[in-house]
Each structure stands twice: as structure tokens, then as C-alpha cells.
Image (cartoon, rainbow, N blue to C red):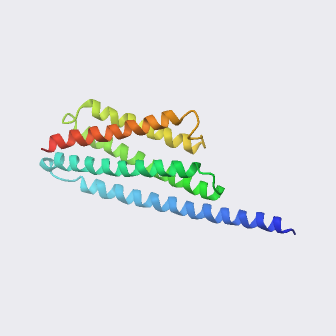
Amino acid sequence: MSSDDRDDRDDGRSRRASLNALSLLATADFIVDFGDGRRRRKDEEVTSSQQAIRLRQKALLLTGEIDELSARIRLFALLAQAPEDTLVSDMHLFELLRAANACNARLRHLHQTLMSLYPEVTAELVESVRIAIIDSEAFADSWGASSPLWGPSSETWSGAMARTGSMLISVRSALSEQGS
């Protein structure tokens, strides 16, 4: 057996071990998200007089989380494109998809929260979050299908990120005005 055959076999084992670790990480993420969902539902059981205040606070918290996840997505999108070892690029891609999935979940939760605040918030604001959800899901789908980021879709991607940033500013502004 040649050393090349042994190296190939070792690379295959290393890759399988890494994929198993990533699978365990994805499972842990699911469990944490499930627990967070249960906690959120329990926290939502408040009196109606406190409901609007809590919803505004929750929406502001979600905008901060979405902002942080957007920054992580931009970072991992750049790292996933760097000419490195395939395993390292795969790990960056995995982190990118995890951040995109978490961002999608937060955007959906923000949309539901704003729907609960309607008519205190405008329909345009709620619609801008819905559009951000569509953009975010399309972004994650394009990466999941191994679509190149810096190809023809790069303008679409950067436009979606800009719209998401503008939407977050609008949500924060609207909620701050209502809280005063």
C-alpha cells in the first residue's frame, strides 16, 4: 500500500469525523432552538396591559440579534469563499448556513411580533420584514445549493443585506417613537 493511499484514507476518516461533529452541532442547535421556543411561549403569557410593552421590547431585542447574525453571515460568506483547505471552507459554509438559519428564525419571530403590534406599527413596516424573510431564505437556499456568492447573484445578495439593514433601522425607529 502506498503512502498516497494511506493519506487518502486518513483524509476520508478526518472528513467523516468532521462531518459527524458538525451533525452533532446541528442537533444541539435544534435542541437549543426548541428550548428557546418553549421559553418564549411561556414568557408571552402576560397580562394584556403589559403585552404591548413586552412586544416592543421583544422586537427591539430581535433586531439586535438579527443585526449580529447579519454580521456573522457577511463574515462567513467571505471566509467560505477564501481559497483554503476544502474542509475549512466546508466548516465556514456550515457556520454560514447556521447563521442564516438562525437569522431566518429571528426574522420570522420579528414578523410575528410586529403582526401582534399591528395597527400600532404600519403595514409597510410589517411588509418590509416579510420581504427580508424572503431575501434571507433565498440567500440561504442559494448557499445550500452551492451557488457561488460572487457570481451573478452578488448584486442580489448585497441588495438584500442593504434592505435588511434599512428594515432594522426602520423597525427600531418606529418602536422607539412608540415607546416614548
In the rendered image, residue 121, in percent from the top left (x then y), is placed at 22, 35
Is 104 or 7 nearer to us in this picture?
Answer: 7
What residue appears at the point 24 percent right and 52 percent down from the top-left corner? 44
- Image quarter in which the C terminus is found: top left
Q: Is residue 152 left or right of residue 65?
A: right
Say above or below: 78 vs 88: above
Is 118 or 163 nearer to us in this picture?
Answer: 163
Q: Is residue 62 left or right of residue 12?
A: left
What residue appears at the point 33 percent right and 37 percent down from the top-left corner? 166
In the rendered image, residue 57, in percent from the top left (x then y), is placed at 22, 50
Q: Looking at this rendering, what residue extends furthest in the right direction?
A: 1
- Image quarter in which the N terminus is found: bottom right
Quadrant of the rendered structure where residue 162 is?
A: top left
What residue appears at the point 37 percent right and 44 percent down from the top-left corner? 107
Q: Is residue 13 left or right of residue 92?
A: right
What residue appears at the point 18 percent right and 36 percent down from the top-left corner? 120
Q: Looking at this rendering, what residue extends furthest in the front direction?
A: 83
In the rendered image, residue 47, in percent from the top left (x then y), is placed at 15, 51
Say above or below: 115 vs 75: above
Say above or below: 64 vs 127: below
Say above or below: 92 vs 52: below
In the rendered image, residue 167, in percent from the top left (x then y), is placed at 32, 37
